[in-house]
Image: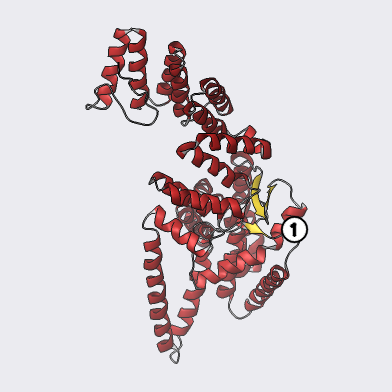
């Protein structure tokens, strides 16, 4: 929404700058600024310079076009600099059939062309849900069957081409209507896999393009209202559209009541959506409904047996719930089957360390925790790893190393009570009562009810003496 605000603001100010000589410079500079802010909000705003070119082509005099096109060059330059400086294209993954493949930097590759061949399916669905926003979902299945386009995909791509040809012909009868349709298509371009990335389809990308649909509806209603014979029909259509979209909005808002409701709705509509099932399982884990969590993870793993994510989440489940020998076996299989994905995955080594610690294999736990910390030296999540590392050293009676690890945890998050508690226990064990009192008082300052015991995750339990 923020990108849309700056996008429309920039376009409006640009139109103002070319329509009024007195405020040209101020409006023009503000337009450039708002375009930059739009890019900072969302990279899809990069379509704006093309929209400006479209506007000039449709609504300016031929003798003015060259001068106006030159005025758009700074917008293209800002977009180019933004992507060169602020964006790094990296390899991402999609799922094709039952195999996980990678693409993202290889333009024109067979896989990239395969994804482009399915463009008609995605864009025509964007058009469909603009008119009929039914069966909406947060996360869609990112799946293509095989590396050869299906007959349906080719047919829909041809339909898309026909729509574009008809839109060009429409210019003779209604420039405004033709402009609104082209606006829609141009704003969809940044997410049409021309630059390949992992998510093939997502409704959130329709936000800025949908303004073209709204403009088209407004143009239609305007024509009806200004025709005496059709004004009544126009009123009926306006009321019908308002009621239709109003009730659909209310219905969809109910789905957004909370994360659990939204994801359950998602899975009901698209049961093959792997990430929807995994995120739903995560919510069940938080609610300690482990049976349902395991069900959704298992279904995702069965649907995509050669995919790393559901297999990893299965290991994460066993690491949390047990049995821990099954968790160790699962992570060992992951390392065997997905060495590349595991090698640089901090979470993999962190969970493996946690499993070994729970099995009281502290040397193996320490080794994995240290490996996890080397992968991402600067990260807020490291506070938990340092604290867990300290616990492993604590249980080995290596209290100096435990204290050092707890201190590292506090350096990352000085307001977290757990390492303060652990330090009080460690210093009490080593007989350093002065340090014990200092950290005890700090723990009390964070929680006035603290009396030397803590049941939070990561807190060392006091053994009965």
Viewer-proximal residue, 162 or 180? 162
Residue 111 at x, y percent in the picture = 74, 53
Decide if residue 94 is on the left or right side of residue 328: right
Viewer-proximal residue, 100 or 364? 364
**Location of residue 277 with respect to 429 vertically, above or below:** below
Decide if residue 32 is on the left or right side of residue 420: right
- Badge 1 marks a residue whose secondary structure is loop
At horizontal 65% and vertical 53% (from top left) the residue drawn is: 95
Q: Residues within 10 Å of mark 1 (few under 14, many from 20)?
A: some
Residue 452 at x, y percent in the picture = 27, 21
**Location of residue 343 with respect to 123 vertically, above or below:** above
Viewer-proximal residue, 188 or 441? 441
Residue 175 at x, y percent in the picture = 59, 74
Residue at image mark 1: 147
At horizontal 41% and vertical 70% (from top left) the residue drawn is: 248
Q: How is the image coloured?
A: secondary structure
Residue 442 at x, y percent in the picture = 29, 20
Viewer-proximal residue, 13 or 407? 407
Would residue 341 be seen by someone viewing this image from the given angle? yes
């Amino acid at each position: 929404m923020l990108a849309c605000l700056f996008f429309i603001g920039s376009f409006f100010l640009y139109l103002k700058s070319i329509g009024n000589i007195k405020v040209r410079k101020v409006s023009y500079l503000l337009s450039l600024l708002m375009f930059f802010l739009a890019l900072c909000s969302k990279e899809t705003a990069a379509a704006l310079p093309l929209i400006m070119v479209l506007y000039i082509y449709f609504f300016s005099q031929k003798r003015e076009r060259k001068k106006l096109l030159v005025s758009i060059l700074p917008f293209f330059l800002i977009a180019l600099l933004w992507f060169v400086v602020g964006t790094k294209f990296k390899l991402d993954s999609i799922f094709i059939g039952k195999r996980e493949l990678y693409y993202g930097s290889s333009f024109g590759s067979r896989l990239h062309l395969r994804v482009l061949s399915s463009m008609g399916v995605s864009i025509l669905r964007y058009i469909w849900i603009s008119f009929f926003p039914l069966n909406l979902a947060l996360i869609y299945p990112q799946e293509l069957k095989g590396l050869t386009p299906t007959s349906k995909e080719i047919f829909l791509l041809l339909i898309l081409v026909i729509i574009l040809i008809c839109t060009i012909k429409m210019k003779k009868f209604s420039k405004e209507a033709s402009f609104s349709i082209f606006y829609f298509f141009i704003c969809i371009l940044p997410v049409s896999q021309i630059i390949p990335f992992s998510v093939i389809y997502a409704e959130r990308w329709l936000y800025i393009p949908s303004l073209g649909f709204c403009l088209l509806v407004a143009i239609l209603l305007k024509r009806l209202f200004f025709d005496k014979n059709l004004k009544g029909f126009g009123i009926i259509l306006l009321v019908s559209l308002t009621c239709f979209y109003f009730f659909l909005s209310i219905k969809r808002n109910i789905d957004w009541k909370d994360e659990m409701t939204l994801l359950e709705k998602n899975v009901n509509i698209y049961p093959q959506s792997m990430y929807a099932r995994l995120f739903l399982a995560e919510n069940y884990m938080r609610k300690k409904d482990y049976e349902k969590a395991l069900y959704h993870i298992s279904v995702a793993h069965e649907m995509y047996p050669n995919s790393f994510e559901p297999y990893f989440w299965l290991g994460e489940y066993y690491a949390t719930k047990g049995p821990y020998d099954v968790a160790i076996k699962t992570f060992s299989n992951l390392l065997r089957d997905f060495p590349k994905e595991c090698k640089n995955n901090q979470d993999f080594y962190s969970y493996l360390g946690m499993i070994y610690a729970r099995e009281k294999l502290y040397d193996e736990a320490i080794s994995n925790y240290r490996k996890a910390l080397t992968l991402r030296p600067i990260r807020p999540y490291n506070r938990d790893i340092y604290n867990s590392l300290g616990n492993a050293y604590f249980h080995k009676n290596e209290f100096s190393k435990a204290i050092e690890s707890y201190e590292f945890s506090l350096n990352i998050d000085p307001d977290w009570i757990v390492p303060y508690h652990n330090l009080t226990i460690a210093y009490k064990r080593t007989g350093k009562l002065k340090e014990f009192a200092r950290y005890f008082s700090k723990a009390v300052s964070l929680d006035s009810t603290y009396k030397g015991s803590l049941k939070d995750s990561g807190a060392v339990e006091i053994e009965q003496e």
